[in-house]
Amino acid sequence: MRLPAPVVAVFAALMLAGCQTFAPAYDNTLDTQMTTAFQGVAKLSAEIELGSYADKATYDGATGEYTTIISSLTVAALRADTLPVQAKAPAERARTLLVGLIKGCQTQVTTVAAIHKATGLAPGAGISAPMLTSCDQAARAAQALKP
């Protein structure tokens, strides 16, 4: 049996509205900023593991990388925090969790930067893995909103 076009349109609208109940709407800027941040974190992590930042004197040369990553995460957190959702719906909780993941990534990056500034970053010391994992989770959560 073939359904009339207006019935199909109403059904499709209801399905899309249901999605908004469970997850915030996709935001391209959020996705782009998280991708930029995660790519920066992956590069930074590789440089740490290759010994590029073993001496604290290398901190000044890395501030541009930290700035790019942290500024992308700041924009992403602000965008995520303002995603439209229905009040008290699961989407509101999902938005809160997404913002928490992004801020957790940002905390990891600023912690690594502080360690770098104070002592340098020894390769193989396990400093980069928590940062990389935290930021990967945040980036995946942002990309999961993509329709």
Image: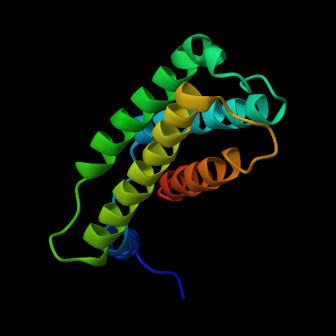
* Residue 31 seen by the camera: no
Q: Is residue 13 left or right of residue 146?
A: left
Farthest residue toward the top? 61
Taking depth in this image into account, of 27 and 6 the one nearest to the observer is 27
Residue 54 is situated, as x and y percent measured from the top left of the image, at 74, 27
Q: Quadrant of residue 58?
A: top right
Residue at image coords 63%, 22%: 56
Residue 64 is situated, as x and y percent measured from the top left of the image, at 53, 15
Residue 10 is situated, as x and y percent measured from the top left of the image, at 31, 72
Q: Is residue 113 left or right of residue 44?
A: left
Farthest residue toward the left? 87
Residue at image coords 31%, 70%: 91
Residue 35 is situated, as x and y percent measured from the top left of the image, at 57, 37
50 shown above or below 98: above
Farthest residue toward the bottom? 1
Taking depth in this image into account, of 25 and 107 the one nearest to the observer is 107
Farthest residue toward the front? 119
62 shown above or below 146: above
The colour scheme applied to this rendered structure is: rainbow
Q: Is residue 49 left or right of residue 69?
A: right
Taking depth in this image into account, of 145 and 95 the one nearest to the observer is 95
